[in-house]
Amino acid sequence: MGRRGVRVAASDVPTSIHLRRSYLRERPAALPELSELDVVRHFTELSRRNFGVDTSFYPLGSCTMKYNPKVAERIASYPGFAHLHPLLPQLRMGGILTQGALEVLYEMERLLCEIVGMAAFTMQPLAGAHGELTGIMMMAAYHRHRRNHKTTVLIADSAHGTNPASAAIAGYTVASVPSDAQGGMDVQALKGMLNDQVAGLMLTCPNTLGLFNPNVREICDLIHSVDGLAYYDGANLNAIVGKVKPADLGFDIVHLNLHKTFATPHGSGGPGSGPVGVVEKLAEFLPVSTVIKRSDGTYALEYDRPNSIGYIAPFYGNFGIILRAYVYILMLGREGLERVAENAVLNANYVREKLKDYYHLPYPQVCKHECVFSAARQAERGVHALDIAKALIDRGFHPPTMYFPTTVKEALMIEPTETESKETLDAFIDAMIEIARLAETHPEQITAAPTTTPVGRLDETAAARNLNIASL
Amino acid sequence: MIDKASRYAETHEWARLEDGGMVVVGLSSFAIEQLGDVVYMELPAVGGEVTKGEALGVVESVKAAADVYAPVGGKVAAVNDAVQGDPDVLKRDAYGAGWLVKIEAADPKEYEALMLADAYEKFVQNQEQ
Amino acid sequence: MPFIANTEQQRQEMLDAIGLTAADLFSDVDASMRCGPLDMPAGMSEQAVRARLAELAGKNSINLTCFLGGGFYDHFIPAAVGALIGRSEFYTAYTPYQPEISQGTLQAIYEYQSAICRLTDMQAANASLYDGGTALYEAMMMALRVTDRNKIIIDDSVNPIYRVMIHSYTRNLKIELVETKNADGQADREAILKLLDDKTAGVIVQNPNFFGLIDDYSDLAEAAHAKGALLICSCYPTSLGILKTPGAMGADIVTGEGQSLGLPMSFGGPYLGFMATRSKYVRKMPGRIVGEATDTEGRRGFVLTLQAREQHIRRDKATSNVCTNEALCALTALVYLSLLGREGLRETAQLCADKASYAYQKLTAIKGVRPYFRAKWFFNEMVLDLPCEASGVIGRLIEKGIAAGFPLSRYYEGMDNAILIAVTEKRTKEEIGVLAEALEAVL
């Protein structure tokens, strides 16, 4: 229809060379032909079909959906950051013109080292799972350097799927360590799995049940006894930030999700940022490049790293995300970070205690940042975790994580985060109690949910069988 | 439902010996129920060799995926392509029209070593607990 | 305390309500495991933080005229892009696990997948990957899975930043990765055909390549297919406004860096890795994929589909470990492409090519400056041979406020005098003139 959105600047140069015809596409790509207002209305309408932290309570377990401060968005758009070309520091005289950005990276590394107790950090990994892969690649480099022949990485059965996937993609075989009756890693089983093939172990602490493993030190010691490395999956750091440093527990490698603990927006599924910290003996394996501070106070990039695992990202990480997290840490400061964990844990325990009479709580002890219920009781009446999730939608809440960890049947994993108020939690608790009651008296009202959304439950089976993933 | 005439692997495949040493293989009703609606499967090529206990294919539902392991080793003699077009046949007729592959068993002892229906029934009951 | 809702009084009320003390909450963490107070500054006010960060931003250059490219470009970004992706219903949401309340994100991803397919002439695209480099690595891994082979041939005029990344990732894997040296700036057909055999999973090329040169890889696609291998092509999406598509060349997997589609350069990220393939390979493709679906009342909607390939279900057997991708960056690219539209993207690409060829004429008219390669078909980036070392010249031009280009000696041995210069639609005739004068003056 030929409608135009943005007018492209008029050319001020002659069209002097006509490219060879065989190098050109036959017809322009069939992109939309819309006015700017058409486009704005379309995406504004789409945005209204979303839940976000800014619209609704979003207790999605293991995802740490805390409030994303607006000041960070503002700062990330400063031209001095947003318009900076990443190749500049690689040019002669170019480093001088990126001193502010390099200082952010350097300072952020120092702050994260302090927060988790590690000796060095790389800011390069572009998401949590990318950090895992980076960490496991360093694990492999360490063993190669020591001429160890290791084949296996041990991972808790309750771990996020990214753990085994990352270890496998890095070239390792994965062995799954079972949980014990308290929900933690089974230390006896772990002992039985230890041998000199074990390259290391990946552990989330607190784990995906929201439980802190009291044996975590012993587990790290056991791994070290076979010259393995202990990897800390920082997905749940929000529970212990400012309280416990993973390095003090015996971990050698840690990745953090800046989009969880450090409040950068989740962006409907990215971009994230997954920096990785290591103990001193692993620092030589960190990716190229690293930011250094020279004796004259200026910052530079160090490329000469002979034992490094090499390049894992094109540049210095998702700088725009790192910058937002830096802003967040500066604003909270030392006492603020500690309050984060205290309030995140209080909020989760408040929900746990208030709902435990209504939903089955498989692990009744004090939890950390999240609690996991089972809808097994409701399932007997034909109301499953999925139905409860959909009923919550009708009541204005984003559902918890469902059916994970898989070690709990009908799991509902609730992570309120510290940024939520008592009033919000009370409203959520009331809704959960109402749903539990209806599951007893009028289960059909729960299984019919949601009724307030632009679309109802979608047929995912048909969607997968008759695949339509693009309008061509 | 468990087919009394078949034998079973711990990984929930059924196997039935036909004339001429041919072993027909499928997934037990229990396994199919656990998976949910199957949306896709990947099966081996006819003529390929499979080893007992190793994955010969994958069955996917919307929320889960399961490897199908060869209950016996040998050459793949036939593959049931009809299942791909109508995955619901697995639910309707798991032990009949829902068969997946036929294997020319290399070693009859491998078949003999599989669980009988009664043993599998107990095995499943234990798993459910 | 910033960003923490409850007051001390409310905290106490909550503790009382559940019969716990503050100490109980961490009773499972032994005292010996606790750390002392963190050694870092106290919290700052928003005003103080903004002043501090404005100071840091001010230490970075913003006034350089940018002729620096290398796969990352200074393109114009319409204001409506920022306005729309700045809606917090998009940026404060997470992965659309609950389709009923994520139709905005899901439909946007479906539209993004469609736009990438139309741009590249492919049939299936994923919801995005981290960046062009990790996307290329994932494409390589995908080719290994599709073919069940383990040899990869990669032309060395593929972005060297991506090549070093692929080397890092494959170090512990049993993959035979063979690099072929370019022949006068372009993929060496003879060398590639010699290496191409029935063990080869894929051939990796780039268009335009790192030197900015345009190629038509139809011959390589045909040769690869004849041996049962795949052709993987990394491409610069803006160039697809006018250039022959990888789909038309017969490529099997297409990847690229989507930064040029409305994302600021942001000192290296966040960027956008895109990936597209042929329908028959969709189940081997990594990353999230959105598909059309119907609800119980027959209404059209969208869901995440083919999830059984992914890590949260398949764990160590997944097609990739990727979980979080770059959804907001994909949305940015979609909004950008929707605003520019069919004609706008074509015009932008044409402008880039026109301005680059104008710059080429101005610069090669300078005494001692010559084209480095004989091939003259470039898109918006060119390699010029200077009469002296390029890195020194670049340093002197930076002092004059111009980021003139990239010294190729950094990645290519023997190319000490070669400079890679990029010209986007943002550069004016006047700026190109200033570059030419300044270059002439420092030589």
Image: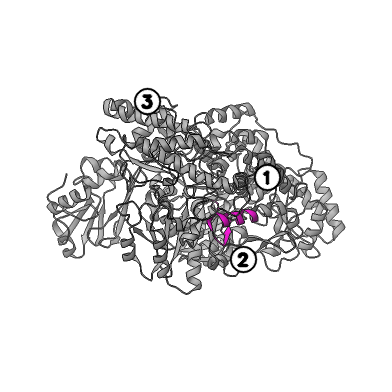
Q: How far apart are marks 1 and 2 (CA)?
A: 35 Å
* Residue A82: assigned label: 1
* Residue C181: assigned label: 2
Residue pushed farthest right?
Answer: C441
Q: Are marks 1 and 2 on the same chain?
A: no
Label 2 with label 3: CB-CB less than 8 Å: no
Q: Mark 3 points at which residue?
A: C297
Q: What amino acid is found at the position of numbered circle 1 in the picture?
A: Ala
Give percent across and percent down for residue A204. 43, 53
Mark closer to the observer (1, 3)? 1
Give the residue displayed 55% in from the left and 47% down from the top: A337
- Helix, strand or loop at mark 2: loop
Left or right side of C108 for C42? right
The range drawn in magenta is: A106-126
Label 1 marks which chain's residue? A
Q: Are marks 1 and 3 on the same chain?
A: no
Label 1 with label 2: CB-CB less than 8 Å: no
Give percent across and percent down for residue C345. 64, 39
* Residue B59: assigned label: none
Q: What amino acid is found at the position of numbered circle 2 in the picture?
A: Lys
* Count of numbered labels shown in the rendering: 3
Q: Does the magenta stretch include residue C358?
A: no
* Residue C349 seen in the figure: no
Q: How far apart are marks 1 and 3 (CA)?
A: 45 Å
Give percent across and percent down for residue A151. 40, 67
Give the residue displayed 17% in from the left and 59% down from the top: B114
Q: What amino acid is found at the position of numbered circle 3 in the picture?
A: Glu
Of labels 2 and 3, earlier in sequence is 2
